[in-house]
Amino acid sequence: MICAFGLTEREAGSDVSVMNTTAVRSGDNYIINGHKIYITNAGYADTYIIFAKTDESKGARGISAFILEKGTPGFSFGQEYKKMGIRASMQRELIFEDVCLPVENRIGAEGDGFKIAMTALDVGRLGVAAQGVGAAWGAYDLALEHAKNRVQFGKPITANQAVSFMLADMATSIETSKLITLKAAYLLSKGLPFSKEVAMAKLVATDTAMKVTTDAVQVFGGKGYLVENQAERFMRDAKILQIYEGTNEIQRLVIAGHILK
């Protein structure tokens, strides 16, 4: 079964505590009303984990999590987004209009939603860090091969220090990103705390992806800007990695919170 994770709203991005989706208890059920945006797999997924306010007076501590099945009355999908990159991935709106869910569809206790969401995001950030490594690595391989074979002024462009140093920086940044991502994965696999390390991995790997893919396009020159060249796709796809699963500005907040305790 394909799953989806419904957290983000128009006014609730980095600050999920201001979400407007509500879940009002009515006997053995909850009545859910609200709206989510940018939800990956929306429309395709069979099962959705959604977050709603069960107590609007408590901010983040008033958020609860629920399991919602596709086809539940009152649950529908809004617009499909056209994006700069990751075009093979579907993002749509989720719309809840008097959706009736039994109490047993709640995950954990009332008010556990924020904690559940943050735990899920930690794991998700590891995947995004790995995406960052992959995008950077793929773009680097293309750029390296091109630079070795592209001849200008009678010699491969790798003979120019400007290009060779750019490639050296790309390779070094990728190796750094790989190592910190693997460290976060190791800590997770051992059941050890890893929130700080995965925030670092997400930050470093995705900033590296944006820099390396941009440099790869530069190595290709005008050819790198053409849609037929895979380098431009790596560059477009890399940008979202700095934004979703928590912006890189939020990662810095997370890291600072850990080191300043």
Image: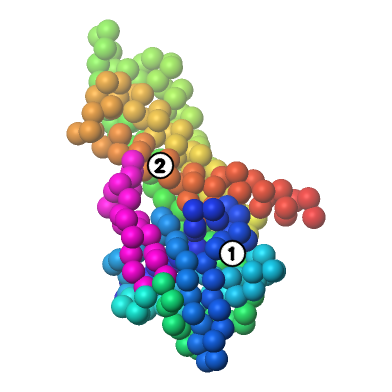
Q: Callout 2, which amino acid?
A: Ala
Q: Position of residue 92 (x, y in %)?
A: 35, 58
Q: Which mark is residue 118?
A: 1
Nearest the viewer among 42 and 184 is 42
Looking at the rendering, which quadrant does residue 223 occupy?
A: top left
Q: Is residue 112 magenta?
A: no
Q: Position of residue 207 (x, y in %)?
A: 51, 39
Check the image and name the residue furthest to the right: 261
What is the x, y in percent for residue 5? 44, 66
Is 248 or 209 nearer to us in this picture? 248
For residue 119, above or below residue 160 = below
Determine the residue positioned at 49% across, 53% down.
10
Which residue ends up furthest to the left in the rendered image?
228
Which badge, 1 or 2, comes first in the chain's sequence? 1
The mark found on residue 64 in the picture is none
How packed mark 1 is, by other alpha carbons closer than 10 Å (few <14, some 14-19, many 20 or more), is some
Would you say residue 19 is visible in this rendering? Answer: yes
Q: Is residue 147 visible?
A: no
**Label drawn at residue 238:** 2
Could you say whether the residue bearing mark 2 is in a helix, strand or loop?
helix
Is the C-beta separation of discs 1 and 2 under 8 Å? no
Looking at the rendered image, the quarter that the N terminus falls into is: bottom left
Q: Which residues are magenta?
A: 75-96
**Residue at the limit of the structure toward the top, as seen here:** 153
Task: Measuring from the top left, give residue 83's x and y in whole percent.
Answer: 33, 45
